[in-house]
Structures are given as C-alpha cells and as structure tokens.
Amino acid sequence: AHKSLAGIIYDEASICGEPTESVKEGALAVVKEYPEETLLSNPHSLRPAVLSELISDDGMMCEEIILFRVLEKWATAEIEVGTTRVDDTVEDRVSIAKDLAAEHIRFTSIQPTDLIGTVKESCIVDEKLIFNALAAQAVCAEKKMGVRFSKKRKRKLRSVIKVSCAGSAVINGFYEEGAMHKGYP
C-alpha cells in the first residue's frame, strides 16, 4: 500500500481490533517514520480518537509544527457527502481540534515565527497558549543561550556633517542631520 494511506489503514485496523493488530502496527511504523507524508495527505479521514493518539505519539519523526498542521487541516477539511464523517461539521471539528491542540501540541517546540504566523492564524489555538509558549521560549533563550534582551540605553547619535572651505565663514561648520546651523537650514 502507498504510504499516504498508512494513517487510514491504522484507523481502520484500530476498529477491527485483534485480527488486524499486525496491520495496525505496520501502519503505525510507517506513520511514525513519515508523518508529514502520511498524515498531511488525508487527515480528514481519521477519527478524532485516532488523530489524538497519533499526534500525541512521542515516536513521530517530525517537527511539532507538522503535527499542528495535520490537526489544523483535519479541523478545516471540507467533508464530502457519502463519507463516514458527513455528520461532522467544521465547527465540531474546530472545537475538537482546539482541545486536542491544547492537550497534545508542544507549542514551546514550535519556532516563534510559526507561532505568530501559522498557529495564530489557524483559529484552533487560544492566544493565551501562544503567549505562554513565546514567554517560555524567551526565558529559555535568555537563561540557557545567553540572549540579552535588556541593555543600557545609549544616546541616539545623530549624523554630523562637517562643512569647510565653503567660501563663506557663515556656512562653514558642523551640521546635525535634519537640523540648522546658526539659524540657516
């Protein structure tokens, strides 16, 4: 089977139980090794319990933002008539996704630019969670990596222009950028 189907195979094997346990384990191994390819291709086909199980798995070999994108895509996917999830609404999935994100996504492991971009724009994460992740990242950067955010203020220097040999003593002298010299512009 193509690896993009591994998530669906895992979901279906979960329903069947013991007779398909080896199939389930095989599909899970593929999902863990290729989470971006397997989960982003069709997350809308997964049941919420299976999605929760997969995005919380520590064995996923991907960045946390990928698991977040899977959850976001699952929440916002349009469901076609005739699928097993036709009774779901986008509002239901967004609500479920908010809970799953709060519970399973490690926001402090997501790049700050992705937090203020992709995650904030997603509508499935409370801004307080984003703020808390950014605050934790800032503290970590300051303490563990020596990043300094606060330094003594320095007087803002203006550019100074020296004019000499202008042919007139009135014009010769020092000018500050954007300022006047003895009343002359």
Image: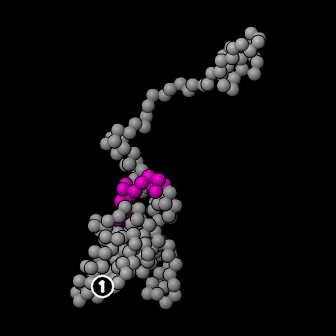
Residue at image location 50% in from the left, 26% down from the top: 154
Q: Farthest residue toward the top?
A: 169
Q: Is residue 54 visible?
A: no
Relative vertical location of residue 43 with respect to residue 117 in this rendering, above or below? below
Residue at image location 23% in from the left, 83% down from the top: 22
In terms of depth relative to the viewer, which is nearer, 139 or 19? 19
Image coloring type: one colour
Q: Is residue 33 visible?
A: yes
Q: Pointer 1: what residue?
A: 13
In terms of depth relative to the viewer, which is nearer, 60 or 89? 60
**Amino acid type assigned to the residue bearing label 1 in the image:** Ala
83 sits left or right of 108 in the view: right
Instruction: Look at the image and say whether residue 82 sits in the magenta stretch.
Output: no
Q: Secondary structure at mark 1?
A: helix
Give the quadrant of the N terminus.
bottom left
User: Looking at the picture, how far across and down is residue 77, in whole percent?
Assistant: 50, 76
User: Looking at the picture, how far across and down is residue 184, in whole percent?
Assistant: 76, 18
Residue at image location 44% in from the left, 87% down from the top: 84
| Mark 1 neighbour class, 10 Å CA radius: few under 14, some 14 to 19, many 20 or more | some
Relative vertical location of residue 83 with respect to residue 62 in this rendering, above or below? below
Q: Which residues are magenta?
A: 104-116
User: Looking at the picture, how far across and down is residue 110, in whole percent?
Assistant: 40, 56
Quarter of image, res 140: top left
Residue at image location 44% in from the left, 52% down from the top: 112
In terms of depth relative to the viewer, which is nearer, 130 or 158? 158
Give the quadrant of the C terminus.
top right
